[in-house]
Image (tube, rainbow, N blue to C red):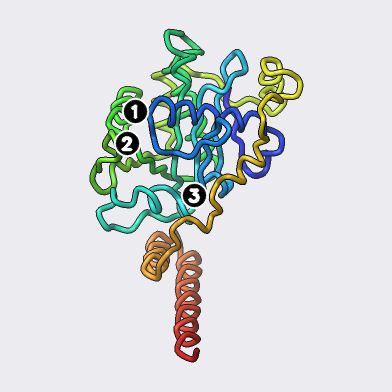
């Protein structure tokens, strides 16, 4: 069962979010050995402070067993600010209709050896379906994700192969990383559904998800955790810690908005933004000279 948690409904699912961050810690820090920040058993980074959408999967026991983070590319995101070496000096894609998918993981320890609805393959497909359907309904055309060769092969086998790649693969720690592009199309979603044999609606209602989770974790959710989710976010660096855009970044962003305009109205708006930013930058330079 899938629930998407964002800034609008986060107050309802704080316990589930805490368990999602705990799953991320077990996968990325404990199993994969990534250099990530873990506080009180939860892996949280600066991009979680930007109010992304979290696609979270619960199994039949009410446990969080899979997740993925979706973030717009118009602002800070991992490919632009962490994995930019992959792009070989090319500017990152920036569009409100392109989202970045990161922090995908599945609880392989719990799901190992299980079949049908509680298998690793099923949960992987369910998270993917939930992410693509949520993005599609939000008007998103494409998703970009930094993946490794193993994940690339998994996606190819499950009829979810990237249609293109950005830059070139780069060694990142113990594995190579590549930037993959996936369209949020009906064909892709149908292919994943057909591969996994999933024909039903994967999303649960708020009440269904909360009931399933609390049945397994107690009426108050995971009250045994020593630190609340909100205080855990205090450990994450503020958004300002992310690399600030340069003038080159702003110019390339404006040019991309003009080039991607779907009609004359959007093109006029993009040109107006470009002119406004140019005036601001000129004023900033003049102020520095006067000082």
Q: Nearer the viewer, residue 85 or 179?
A: 85
Per the rendering, the mark at residue 250 is none
**Mark 3 vs mark 2, CA separation in Å:** 19 Å
**Mark 1 vs mark 3, CA separation in Å:** 22 Å
Q: Residue at x 33, y 58 (%)?
A: 91
Q: Nearer the viewer, residue 68 or 108?
A: 108
Label 3, residues with CA under 10 Å away: few <14, some 14-19, many ≥20 = many
How many numbered circles are shown? 3
Label 1, residues with CA under 10 Å away: few <14, some 14-19, many ≥20 = some
Task: Name the element at disc 2.
Answer: loop
Per the rendering, the mark at residue 155 is 1
Q: Residue at x 62, y 40 (%)?
A: 232
Q: What residue would you read off at disc 2?
A: 162
Q: Position of residue 243 (x, y in %)?
A: 43, 58
Sequence-first disc among 3 and 2:
3
Q: What residue would you read off at disc 3?
A: 72
Q: Is residue 153 left or right of residue 127?
A: left
Q: Position of residue 282 (x, y in %)?
A: 45, 83
Q: Is residue 234 left or right of residue 169?
A: right
Label 2, residues with CA under 10 Å away: few <14, some 14-19, many ≥20 = some
Sequence-first disc among 1 and 3:
3
Q: Position of residue 164 (x, y in %)?
A: 28, 42
- The quadrant holding residue 190 is top left
Q: Is residue 283 left or right of residue 231?
A: left
């Amino acid at each position: 069962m899938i629930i998407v948690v964002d800034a609008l409904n986060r107050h309802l699912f704080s316990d589930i979010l805490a368990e999602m961050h705990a799953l991320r810690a077990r996968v990325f820090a404990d199993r994969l050995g990534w250099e990530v920040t873990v506080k009180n058993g939860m892996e949280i980074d600066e991009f979680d402070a930007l109010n992304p959408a979290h696609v979270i999967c619960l199994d039949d026991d009410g446990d969080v067993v899979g997740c993925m983070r979706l973030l717009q590319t118009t602002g800070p995101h991992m490919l632009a600010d962490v994995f930019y070496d992959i792009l070989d000096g090319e500017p990152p894609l920036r569009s409100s209709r392109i989202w970045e998918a990161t922090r995908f993981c599945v609880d392989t320890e719990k799901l190992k050896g299980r079949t049908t609805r509680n298998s690793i393959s099923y949960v992987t497909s369910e998270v993917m379906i939930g992410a693509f359907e949520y993005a599609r309904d939000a008007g998103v055309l494409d998703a970009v994700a930094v993946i490794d060769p193993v994940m690339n092969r998994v996606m190819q086998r499950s009829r979810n192969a990237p249609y293109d790649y950005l830059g070139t693969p780069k060694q990142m720690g113990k594995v190579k990383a590549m930037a993959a592009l996936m369209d949020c199309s009906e064909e892709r979603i149908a292919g994943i559904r057909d591969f996994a044999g999933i024909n039903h609606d994967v999303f649960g209602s708020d009440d269904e998800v909360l009931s399933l989770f609390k049945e397994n974790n107690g009426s108050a959710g995971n009250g045994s955790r020593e630190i609340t989710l909100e205080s855990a976010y205090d450990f994450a660096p503020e958004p300002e810690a992310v690399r600030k855009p340069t003038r080159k970044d702003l110019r390339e962003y404006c040019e991309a908005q003009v080039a991607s305009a779907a009609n004359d109205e959007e093109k006029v708006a993009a040109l107006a933004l470009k002119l406004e930013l140019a005036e601001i930058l000129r004023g900033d330079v003049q102020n520095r000279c006067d000082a």
